Amino acid sequence: MDTMVTNTRQAMAAGPGAVTVTRPVTPTRTARFGGNGPSGSNGGGSGGDRRGGGGQDWTPDRYRIGMWVAIGSILMLFTALTSAYIVRAGLPGSNDWQPITMPPLVWVSTALIIASSFTIVASRKALARDEMTGYERWLWVTLLLGVGFIGMQLLAWRQLVGQGVYLASNPHSSFFYVMTGLHGLHILGGVLALAFMVLRVRRQRGTSAGQGIDPKRRVATDVLGIYWHFMDGLWVYLLLLLILWR
Amino acid sequence: MAEAETIHDVIQPAAAHAHAPSVAAHHHGPPTGFIRKYIFSVDHKVIGIQYLLLAMAAVLVGMLLSVLMRMNLTWPGTAWPLLEILFPIGAKGGVMTPEFYLSLVTMHGTMMVFFVLTTAPQGGFGNYFLPIQIGAEDMAFPTLNMLSFWVTFVGFVALIAAAFVEGGGPTGGWTGYPTLSAIGGKLNVPGMGSAQNLWWNGQNLWIISIAIFCVASLLGALNFITTLLNMRTRGMSLMRMPLTCWSWFTTAILALLAFPVLLAAGVLLFLDRTADTSFFVPGGLSDGTRVLTEHNGGSPILWQHLFWFFGHPEVYIAILPGMGVTSHVLSTFARKPVFGYRAMVFAMFAIGLLGFFVWGHHMFLSGMSPYTGMAFSVLTLTIGVPSAIKTFNWIGTLWGGRIRFTTPMLFAIGFVSLFVAGGVTGIVLGQTSLDLSMHDTYFVLGHFHLVMGVAAIFGMFAGTYFWFPKMFGRMMSERLGKIHFWPTFIGVYAIFIPFHIMGIVGMPRRYASFEEYEFLRVLDPVVLFVTIAVIITVAAQFLFWYNFFWSIWKGEPAGDNPWEATTLEWSTSSPPPHDNFGGRVLTVYRGPYEFAVPGAPDDYVMQTTPDAAEENQSPLVQGGSEISGNGHNGHKH
């Protein structure tokens, strides 16, 4: 499983005049995904940026890099909100900041999202063991937890409204709604991606029996896992910010 | 958005081709059918040209807006019957109202900064040439690429719509400062976005447009970074990339980190306008007679911090690609390697990095501690160092070269000239004590129009004249190009040097007219002179457009490498085939600017030319047939 199948392209990369230094092929993460099953012929490159091929093969790296870059920009979005939050909280001469009490339901949603981080790891591990049923089951659980999180956040909003705390009530409540809202939108994106993957498993089940697992599914699961953990961590961070910095 | 694309690319083809999962999602033959080929194309080359055409439409609008502004400044109170037809409220009876003028300023700035300076150099040329210059077949995420263009287009439509909705266009300026941008609609001043409609007024549409643009830019930046890191062809190490690629890479990183901040600020501003939150609107805001709004406690300065944390890197987003193109073109036509390639790369990164730490110099007069101002001032002046490195290296590149004065070369030299002329006044404005008197005057306008506006435009012109043969397979007319260059070059100086003088005299920016200011009457001839220069310069641009569209169909056939240049885009046909290299995989053997290499048969050595010792063993392009056999055996749609 961890052997990289040498293909024409890699042979050429070591050919005369090629600048790429041929490294001994080590079982890297890349190799693990690229060299799996009957589709090993796509190689996966020898480490992303040195690969040849002018982009004719897909590489798992591409999606991983893309996800990390995307996370970088999402991080900046919430960094900007954080700095606005801190400045607004400590604004001299302004006395309208009234810390809100967190609606109790946020603790439920926090528990759900943390649990979902574990279930998505479980699904990934099941996929690594080629257990499609376990994979699918944990994916479903993660999806449900994700939907549950969004539902709980919405109910938490209702709880706040029930207390008479609205978006414009005071800056702390404004930031609460804005941050949970924007984070919730990102979770919604992850939930849609999860739903898409789950439905694909169901549809593929009949057709690809015995074909081995598509390496693209492994990458998709992997990349979505990165995103999901990030969103989980981001929520815990936002919650701590909203509770502790007031 | 990003994850959706990932999933789509990952899953889609796998489902369709369970037996051939190794085929890339975007790896397909050229699309047939007009819509797939030219409208919703996923080909980075088509998308690049779409971006360029969008920028051309935007620059035309922006330019005409500046002519309108000049008309009002020079002949205030004159009735322009045509205007009344377009803007019955803003220009009642054909006479521009001050609010209308302010919306012209806003629309001009927004149009130019976002939809021209950000769109064309990065989205246009970057999209077209980054994959080709690194030997890739396409961008890393082609569908995402298509999406980022069309999202940008929606943003453009929203901005145009902002000018025509009831209540008048946005008046907050391209910087959208609250309180004006936050409560303009509520003041019930005609022409200030005071529509009955809470949602569809000019200022709201402006925010929506900018937010959409942010999202599109983020998608683009994501694609650029991934492509550059992941898709370089064999032998294309980072330090063998053309400086253009480095500039697009740096720009993409800046965009990736800066646009989310503007997006966050935009969301908060939008809520201040529509949901009565108080992020930016201070309490007790009064016009002297009554308290205007129910808001309490917000800080307009907070917006300025957020905006300029984005805004200053944005300035470099506009200019850095121009620097890349200039280095590229100067080297090609001086027939010399770029002087100090490494230093150029590091200087570019230094400029990008420092760009994140100087936003405060836009706010010296917004009320900040003198110590903070000092820190920002020092950091700002530090940018002079990498800028000077770049300038000296450009001169070093020209020095002793066998210079070919082609049109792109003229514009590249023009870029250096404008960058220096506009940059030195940055040293003036970067100092708190001098900025005290220069702030918000025409001096600032002169400074940034030269350095980020016109210089960046010259970078685009250089890029257009240089790459046109590659994009369309035909040469642009050199003669028309030179006729275009001189009035443009002299024209922009004739416009913006007087701006500095007006600023020193004390003419404030954004004022609709200066009739009531006796001390500015002395400037009347200068104002008139500038307006005449504007009209001539604008007229000269139509030569460019004529040349551009005429040459697409009637220009001389270009051949693959008309400029005898070295980088990968010149190793393929003009225009390149759908997959850029016709199934070949290029191998890169050397750096990007090997001109006048001692002992070489020609005065240039292409990046794909193998070393002499290896020539016998390895053909110029290795294994073309193997690769195309390998790469083309599946999935075509």
Image (cartoon, coloured by chain):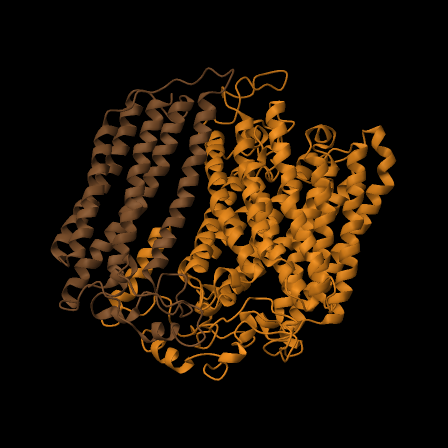
Tell me how many marks there are.
Answer: 0
Q: In which quarter of the image is residue B383?
A: top right
Q: Position of residue A53 (x, y in %)?
A: 40, 70
Vertical comparison of B605 with B485: above or below = below
Residue B598 appears in which quarter of the rendering?
bottom right
Q: Does residue B82 appear in this view?
A: no
Q: In this view, does A95 lie above or below B431?
A: above
State the brown chain.
Answer: A
Horizontally, residue B490 falls left or right of residue B312, namely right
Which residue is located at x 23 percent, y 72 percent?
B19
B321 and B50: which one is in front?
B321
Q: What color is chain B drawn in?
A: orange
Foreground of the two, B128 or B215: B128
If the image is split into quadrants, where does the C terminus of chain B sit?
bottom left
Residue placed furthest toward the bottom? B616
Q: Residue at x 57, y 59 (%)?
A: B243
Q: Where is residue B333 in the image (x, y as percent from the top left)?
A: 69, 68
Along the viewing direction, whichever of A42 and B9 lies nearer the viewer:
A42
Q: Give me the residue at 62% from left, 69% from top.
A: B468
* Relative image position of residue B520 (x, y in whole percent): 83, 32
Q: Is residue A227 left or right of residue B278?
A: left
Can residue B344 be seen here? The reply is: yes
Percent position of residue B422, x then y: 72, 46
- The correct choice, above or below, for B170 with respect to B338 in the image is above
Residue lying at 81% horizontally and 29% vertically, measured from the top left: B517
